Amino acid sequence: MNVQSNRMKWIYYGAGSVLGVVILGFAVNLFLKQNTLNETVETTSSQSIVEVSAAVAGNESLSEFITLNGVTKFLITSTIRSHVTGYVASLNYSTNNMVHKGALFCSVKTKEQDALRDMPRVDTSMQLFNKPLSVYSNAAGLITTLNIHNGDYVSEGDILAVVTEPSSLILVVNVPFEYNRQIHIGTPCDVIFSDHRKMNLCINGILPTVEAASQTQSYYIKLPNQNLPENLNVTLNLMTKKSAVGSLTVPASALQTDELEKEFWVMKIHRGVAYKTPVKPGSQNSSLIEIKEGDIKAGDTIVTDGSYHLEDSSLVSIIQ
């Protein structure tokens, strides 16, 4: 009886010990979980939320441009020359006047006529020989340069005026020869004037010479019916490449790179977290960049402003 009683006591003691160990283990496990949860909450609360601007990746056709300077020129320029030697007796035009071909430009009194100017008083028949000689215009257009005035002495062959044809106004741009395969007749371009006017034109011709020092070739664009002065400087954006329709593109400001420009990435936003996503860029212009490779698809939200020094998996808030 005593043996059986002692055995029952040991069984109770063993069960109690096991139960105590289980309860202790459960308490320790609960304590560790609570600490882990507290640490997670503290870490999350300590990570600041960065405000960023964002845009959506899309599928668009992308064109590349180069920016060059151009200058206006008159393609057709003519001169009016004197065919006699003498003094200008009368002048019918001034600078910026339009002159027609065959019109009387001026009259010139020869030295002989000037020496015999008093002879008609003695012999009236000399009046026929005292009439100044007429000089007719051999060109039509706008008088841009006038080299004479009434009473000036001119020699035979002197240039009296320079006449330009307004409809022959062109825009000349010197293009580096390395672009001769991309830029040709018909290439579209944007012409931007100093007063911020903009015209969409295309290349109309190529001059068959290359400037020796700069290795540039002159291309020209016609500017008909444009009331513009000669030697006006303008800016041109010439298209050199056009990507396939439907290329994946992101704003140019979204692309990030390292100091050596060997690695490229964008910050893609998913559920309020910005993830560093490596990409391979392709064609680009001033506003868009083509993405050839990378874990990005059309419709993904990409950080465009605020991604500088932004770490991977950062919490972000998009501002409007």
Image (tube, helix red, strand yellow):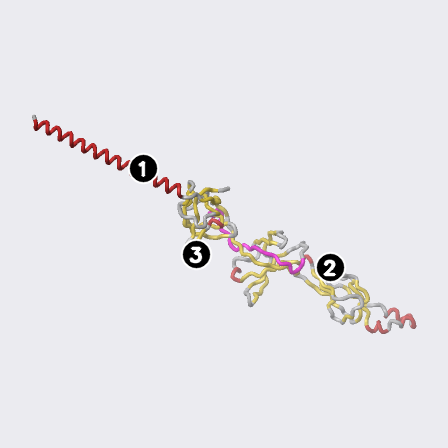
- Rendered image: mark on residue 259: 3
Nearest to the eye among marks 1 and 2: give it. 1
- State the residue at coordinates (8%, 27%): 2
Identity of the residue furthest to the top in this view: 1
Identity of the residue furthest to the right in this view: 122
- State the residue at coordinates (82%, 73%): 111
Nearest to the eye among marks 3 and 2: give it. 3
Q: Tell me where the magenta segment starts and ends, as one range.
A: 229-249
Left or right: 28, with 58 as reference point: left
Q: What is the crowding at mark 3: few (fewer than 14 residues within 10 Å), some, or many (at least 20)?
A: few
Residue at the spot of label 1: 34
What x and y, as percent, mark residue 64? 51, 53
Instruction: Return the residue nearer the eye: 244 or 87.
Output: 87
What x and y, as percent, mark residue 175? 56, 60
Distance between the alpha carbons at the discs numbered 3 and 2:
57 Å
Query: Residue flagged by tag 3: what amino acid is it?
Result: Glu
Helix, strand or loop at mark 1: helix
What x and y, as percent, mark residue 110? 81, 71
